[in-house]
Amino acid sequence: MFTMNKKLNELLDKGKEIKVSIIGAGKMGKGLINQMSRINGMIPSLVVNRHIDKAIEALISSGISRDEIVETDSLKDANYYLEKGRFVVSENIELATKANIIDAVVDATGVPEVGANVALSAIDNRKHVIMLNVETDAVVGPILYKKAREAGVVYTGTAGDEPGATMELYNFAKGLGFEILAIGKGKNNPLNVEANPDTVYEDAIRKGLKPTMLAEFVDGTNTMIELTSLANATGFVPDIRGCHGVESDVKNLTKVLRLKEEGGVLNSYGVVDFVKGIAPGVFAIITTKLEEVHKQMEYLNMGTGPNYVLYRPYHLTSLETPITIFEACYYNEATIAPTEGQVADTITVAKRDLKAGERLDCLGGYTVYGAIERHEIAKKENLVPIGLIDENTKVKRDIRKGEFITYDMIELDQNKTIYKLRKLQDEIIG
């Protein structure tokens, strides 16, 4: 962090700043804007939200005065005012990805289709893409990563999100030469696959969240999606469909997440999983073949081995995103990216009995939830990634509650960008 602050101050001394556009001024976007306002050399120059009042309020809450903020949906006007050092708010997403002086675009919407369009447009306009939208990344991240590399820009998930925080532990252990056995996250909410916006409504309002967002957390879909992105970045896979989701404290984690023949639950190592009882932390289970290193680990109170847990007890979500913005803009490096291709998928499960002719809904809705599976199995069984599901998805035949949904059971909106990207990804990457 000292290096980041030092480099940003050096940019300021040269009259330069990293100028950022943020799409989505909800809890994540607003938090990012506020945190960025305390960092020299990094500016939340342009904020887009479908309700412009929220974009204005997000900037004002960070200490920016109202007379510094300009409302416009015109790209020409946005460019003019940004050049003058004003802050721009808009309901027009195109401004965020096309404005001349913007260096990086942050998508904080959590909507798969929006994320696909934002990322594509940003890449086409040679802007770095920071995805606070793991929902998109889990479905079409590999093809977006490929396109970004070809365009010479960075496509990345974010520090602070659990996949990014876990990736930091993974890189730390790998860089030191440890063997990594399992990685994952704690689950913040009790798992209830039947959760919907009605059942979580009061809790969501109290926490300042959209009911659909909290329902996506509680029904496990968000956890599955985050683990999918982590799998695609590391090559690790789910040990079983939906993961084990064991209960454990940190102290006993290495006893539970080890091979069955060793007294644990795993069929193999090199896996992603989630754990109830260690939230909001993330973990990596590691080992070594060197006796001297085992002795050092025991001396350092890391346990008696042979496996050890690296545990980070927090992740600050969008408050850490400035780190990723800096690394993308200054070093052209990603915090986490799907470098291994589509290793896993979050497949779609019926949340209730579904009737032919009815339409499905969004993530965290009433009709479906997600479960992680290896991509090769999902592809073989024709299972649908949940990020392709939306309110336009039509059910073609009756589907039982708990049934895994295949492409032949539903009619997807093939005009959506995310559908087209996934089809292209399947053709090019596999």
Image: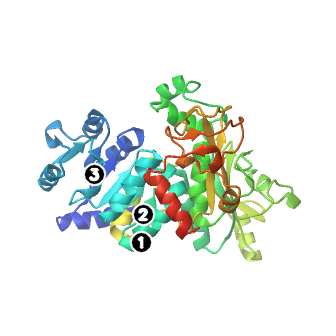
Q: CA distance from mark 2 to mark 3?
A: 18 Å
Q: CA distance from mark 2 to mark 1?
A: 8 Å
Along the horizontal axis of the image, is 24 left or right of 86?
right
Q: Quadrant of residue 222?
A: top right
User: At which x and y percent is residue 136?
Assistant: 48, 52
Q: Specify whether residue 132 is in view.
A: no
Q: Specify whether residue 412 is in view.
A: yes
User: At which x and y percent is residue 232?
Assistant: 58, 62
Where disc 2 sits, the SS reads strand
Along the horizontal axis of the image, is 153 left or right of 259?
left
Along the horizontal axis of the image, is 340 left or right of 160?
right
90 w.r.t. 192: above or below: below
Which residue occupies 17% across, 50% down?
A: 78
Point out the frontmost of discs 3 and 1.
3
Residue denoted by label 3: 94
User: At which x and y percent is residue 392?
Assistant: 49, 39
Residue denoted by label 1: 149
| Badge 3 amino acid | Glu
For residue 155, which numbered disc appears in the image?
Answer: 2
Q: CA distance from mark 3 to mark 1?
A: 21 Å
Which residue occupies 22% across, 56% down?
A: 99
For residue 85, which numbered disc appears in the image?
Answer: none
Which residue occupies 38% across, 53% down?
A: 117
